[in-house]
Each structure stands twice: as C-alpha cells, then as structure tokens.
Image: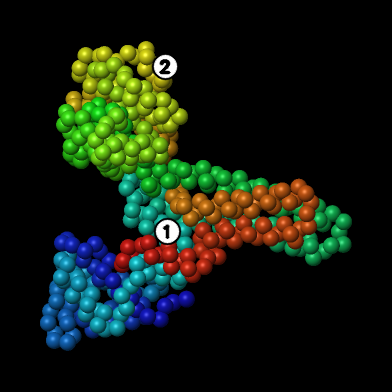
Amino acid sequence: MYQNDTIAAISTALGEGAIGIVRLSGPDAISMANKVFKGKDLAKVDSHTIHYGHVINPKNNHVIDEVMTSVMKGPRSYTMEDIVEINCHGGIIAVQRTLEVVLDQGARMAEPGEYTKRAFLNGRIDLSQAEAVMDLIQAKTDKAMQASVNQLQGSLSSKISVLREEMLQTLAQVEVTIDYPEYDDVEEMSLTQLKETAESVKASIEQLLRQASQGRLFREGINTAIIGRPNVGKSSLLNFLSGVDKAIVTDIEGTTRDTIEEFINIRGVPLRLIDTAGIRQTDEIVEQIGVEKSRQVMEKADLIILILNQAQALNDIDLELLDLTKDQQRIILLNKSDLPTVLDHDQLAKYVDASSIITTSITEESGLDQLEAMIEDRFLGGHLQAADVNYLLNTRHTQLLKQAIEALEEVIDATDMALPVDLIQIDYTRAWDLLGEITGDSVQDELLNKLFSQFCLGK
C-alpha cells in the first residue's frame, strides 16, 4: 500500500533554535534531495547515514544553508518509504527556503499527520500505535509519557489482538459445529461456547475501561478548582503551585474576575489548576459573571481545593461552599495559620471529615507539602506505578469498547434465551469488528482522515 508520490514538510517547530528539519518521504525522496544538496551523491550512500554539505537553489546555484542530511532507505524507516531529513540551522528563513526548493523539485506539501498515516497504511504501526504518537508528543508527565511509549510499542494492540483471536477461534469452532448438524447437542454446544467467550471478553474489556479513567487523568490532567470566598488565598496558592505569578494578588476583594488556568505536575499527578473568582454576593456586573463561571467550574471539577480563612469565623458563603461540594472529591485548606485562629473547628467538623483538612499558611509556604502528599495519595493511592498505566484510552477507544460490551451483552442474553446461533453471530461479529476499529483492522477512510488531521504538520 505504498504511496506513489513524495511528500515534504518542516518537522520541527518554527522559530529560532539550534536545528530545523525538512523531511521528505516517498519513492523520489532521495533523487529530489539530491537536486538541492551539494555534497555526497545521496543515491550512492548507505542507508541510515548522515552527510555534510549545503542546500542550494538549483535555479541559480546560490547556497541557502550549511546542512547535515540523513538518508534512511525503506522499508527501514518511520514510513517504510525512503526518507531524507535535511538538518538546517534552526531559523525561520533557512528552513522555509529549504522547504521551498524541495517543493520546487516536485514534492507535495505533506498534510498534518501524513507521515504517521503512511506508517499506518504501510503496515509499520496500527491505528492505536499511531494515536500513541500524538499522546507521546502531548505528554505532560513522566507517567503519561511512559504510558504513551508502552502503547506505541503495542501494549494496547496486543491486548485487543488477543481478545479478537479468542473470539475468532470460538467463531470458527461454532462454524464447524453448524456444519455437522447430525449431532444432537450441536446447538447447545455452540450456545455454550459463544456465551463463555462473550463473558470472558466482556470481563477483559471492563478491566480496560477501569484503566481508562486513570489514563484520562494522565492524558488530560485532573480538573482542579481552587474555590473560596474573596481574599482567602486562592491566587496565592495558584502562584505557589505553578511557580510563577500567574494571578494578581491584592488585599482588594474581587481582584480575580475570571477563571485562570495553569497545567502543573505534582508528584507525577497532572493537575489542570483553575483559580476561580471569589464567590460572594456582588452588584458589580463583571464580577457577577466571574462568580457564575466559578460555580460552573466547581460543578465539573474532578478535585475541589476549598480554601477557608481560619483567622475568621465561617460565614454563609463558606457554609454554602461546604454544602455544595460535599459529594465531590475535595481537600479543605485552612489558610492563614500564621494569624490567630478564630474559625470554630467543632463547627467545621459537622461539614467535613478531619482527614480532608490541611492547615496552611500559603504566604509562609507551610503545610503545602501535606497538600501535595494528599493529592498524590488521592489519585495514585500510594501504589499506582507508571508501569501499571499501560494504556491511554482516548474517547474513540472508550466508545468502541463500550459498544463492544453492549454487543457482547446482547450475545449473552440471546444465548440464555436459546435463540438461533446464526442470529447470535450477528452481535458477536459486530463486537469483533468494533474491537478491530481500535487497531484499524476494520476502519473507514473518513475516520482515518479525521484522526490524522489532528496531528501536527510534519509528523
């Protein structure tokens, strides 16, 4: 399924840097690069070698840049096609001019994700591995990176392949029994085989889905809302955890008018921190909008960090926030421990368990290690290691697995009702096909185009 044209693109981020790479892939990659490269004859060099020379404009022989050019001959390359990578100096102009002269030789500008798409179409990787490439690029923590590497190496593909093979073997056995209807118990045997396999595969898929929730946390981060009434220390906490002065901190109530977001990594746990506007009654229209957005963020958060001022008594807003978040995953920070305590701890104990309370002074950076430790314990449980997160199931994978479970449940119900085997096979085969969509064994071109269009250009 090799492509018959040659594509080119800049494979590094645009901007100033040490190196910028222009990548060609396709049957004419070497010959096209040869026309713009002045150095060794690239057609005669060994595969997987790199060569010093210059990129020139063939129209006038003007030197564009001093470069190092790598040659990787198919099928031992990322796309399984001939690949040439021209390593330029990492400036915008040098890289752009190099790409222009390559395109002048007849190369086509690559579409987003087309290199990885060719790797898939040429059989080097399956679809779940192709998606892992983007996950690896976007990984924000070590655990997310390791899980992406595992998936790129085929951890999910292997699991899905085992399940499909188990289903296929049962299907083949059922076909054999159907072909020999003279045996009295053939129908009962077929139903038993289908049900046992359906239950086994369903249990394995459910285990995958349980891991999906952990994978989502590492992929997207834990949506963490920092809430509280004005001037309790929300913005100060965001600034401390992020390590930058992201939010303005003043003694004036209502300083934060909108939500402020920052992605951070706490002990391997990725958090999408959202500093919200202080919740209070106000007549100021802009602040009212901010308060309403804070309430919306709070409802959708995976984790609530509710900050209370222990130098003041609980007021109606504090009590309202304690009540609104009682069914959510939350941590209560009693801030301003450097000031005399006024807050009634016995009153607070009526609303929250003591195990969720941490006493802090954000300005003096005390108690914040306890906060980090509690977040780690809440979401990693003190036992989850990077190796345990082998799969970063995305929304597409999750939906396909859920649909496969529904089809398998139809199979199980149908076998209990002793329906004809040929009818049961329809749902059974549908579940098999749905699993195949994860790895790309059964997938439509429209879906492929949509998936790879989300990749960055040059990958």
Q: Nearer the viewer, residue 335 or 116?
A: 335
Q: Tell me what residue is drawn at x 43 percent, y 31 percent.
A: 328
Estimate the x, y position of residue 21 in percent, counting from the top left: 24, 68
Locate the C terminus and report the quarter of the image it occupies: bottom left
Secondary structure under badge 1?
A: helix
| Left or right of 30, for residue 213 | right
Where 223 falls versus 38 (above or below)? above
Mark 1, other Cα within 10 Å: few <14 / some 14–19 / many ≥20: many
Q: Position of residue 362 (x, y in %)?
A: 22, 27
Q: Is residue 92 shown left or right of residue 168? A: left
Q: Position of residue 241 (x, y in %)?
A: 25, 36
Q: Which mark is residue 350?
A: 2
| x and y percentages locating residue 231 in the rendered image | 22, 28
Q: Residue furthest bottom?
A: 59
Which quadrant of the structure image shows residue 371? top left
Which residue: 36% across, 27% down?
Answer: 321
Kind of residue sitting beneath label 2: Lys
In this rendering, is residue 145 above or below 421? above
Residue type beneath disc 1:
Glu
State the SS at label 2: loop
Do tag 2 and tag 1 residues touch (Cβ < 8 Å)? no
Q: Which residue is mark 1?
A: 131
Question: Disc 2 and disc 1: Cα gap in Å?
Answer: 48 Å
